[in-house]
Amino acid sequence: MSNANVGRLLEGMLGCDRTAELLSLLNCPAVVMDCEHNVVTRAELAQAMNVALFDGLLARSPNGKAYVHGVRESGGGVYFDHGALRTVRWNGNGALPPGEAAFTRILRPLGFRLNGRYPLDKIGMTGRAYAHEDAPDEIAQFFLSELHPERFSEKFQRAVSNVVGTSKDPLTPKAVFELAELDRDGSLPLGTAAELLPVIVGAFSRQHEVPALDDYEVLLEESAEMAWIATEGNAFNHATDRVADVFALAEQEKDKGRPMKPDVERSRSGRVFQTAYRADTVEREFRLADGSYITRSVPGSFYEFITRKREYDRTCKRWMTDLRFDAGNATAIFKMTAVGGK
């Protein structure tokens, strides 16, 4: 990894040793192979953010961490394809902007652009993909989904308001200003970027207070996805490793006894194939009616695998990776965070 800017940004957050491990493990986009001293481009900041978010996912997913450890021990690497997060498109969202607006205000200044819309009607959601304009095939995409409470019962909607109504806005006025400058100029001074990075990474977490158990149980009856948001918020739902043959990898992981999804999902195009581990179980607190707290085991985040076929673009006259997603694939993968997801 020759980009000193990305390294410096991450060392301030993760330390030198962990930064070195991650940068030797993850694919390095060509657009950040070189850098200008003390000037951080939007692509560099986007890559640093993605690396930090990937590290955070591993901290919450023991199965993902074990897989990555095995890859590193064998001398291999990880091609970070995309990260996914869930939002709630609801006006009663506290101080946090509704739905994906809470994150597009971060992603767009960093250089990400809309790369597809995917109706997830079976689970009352809409998914949108955002790819980086400077390196769409190499900087990990974001699959950003919104849940639509109005498609559920009034009782469900009240529980949603109770849960997300306490949300705080993680972006400080200073961070908003710095993102505006980044959007305008395409770069920031290194010191400014170093201060901004932990703020934007911190946005990918739970912004609301500990949910009431009664509200959680109401949400769980109608939407496993909203119940997941109640405990995990806007954390990475999963991070995805792009591999050469997801079918072979799935069988290998099953042979190791890993909690693998039974079947590989196939897109309607026949060019995108996905599978995943079931979500790791985490311990989360809930508030009881008398003001006391109880801890329960619930689904957390998980690690996913994808194989993308290439197609020849006659206009560009070169082979292009199919960077699209598939609504059917996404709906099935989302079940990994349901209790007993299959």
Image (cartoon, helix red, strand yellow):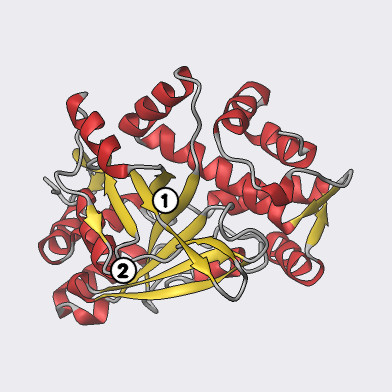
Percent x, y for residue 307? Answer: 37, 50
Q: Nearer the viewer, mark 1 or mark 2?
A: 2
Q: Is residue 64 above or below residue 229?
A: above
Dot 1 or dot 2: first in sequence order is 1
Q: Residue at 18% across / 64% down in the picture?
A: 223
Q: Quadrant of residue 295?
A: top left
- Looking at the rendered image, the quarter that the N terminus falls into is top right
Q: Residue at x 68, y 66 (%)?
A: 176
Amino acid residing under circle 2 = Ser
Instruction: Mark yes or no: residue 72 visible.
Output: yes
Towards the viewer: 73 or 341: 73
* Left or right placement of residue 206 versus residue 113 in this view: left
CA gap between label 1 and label 2 equals 30 Å
The one nearer the camera, 155 or 61, is 61
Q: Which residue is mark 2?
A: 269
Pinpoint residue 157: horizontal percent, then vertical percent.
Answer: 23, 75
Q: Amino acid at mark 1?
A: Ala
Quarter of the image holding residue 277?
top left
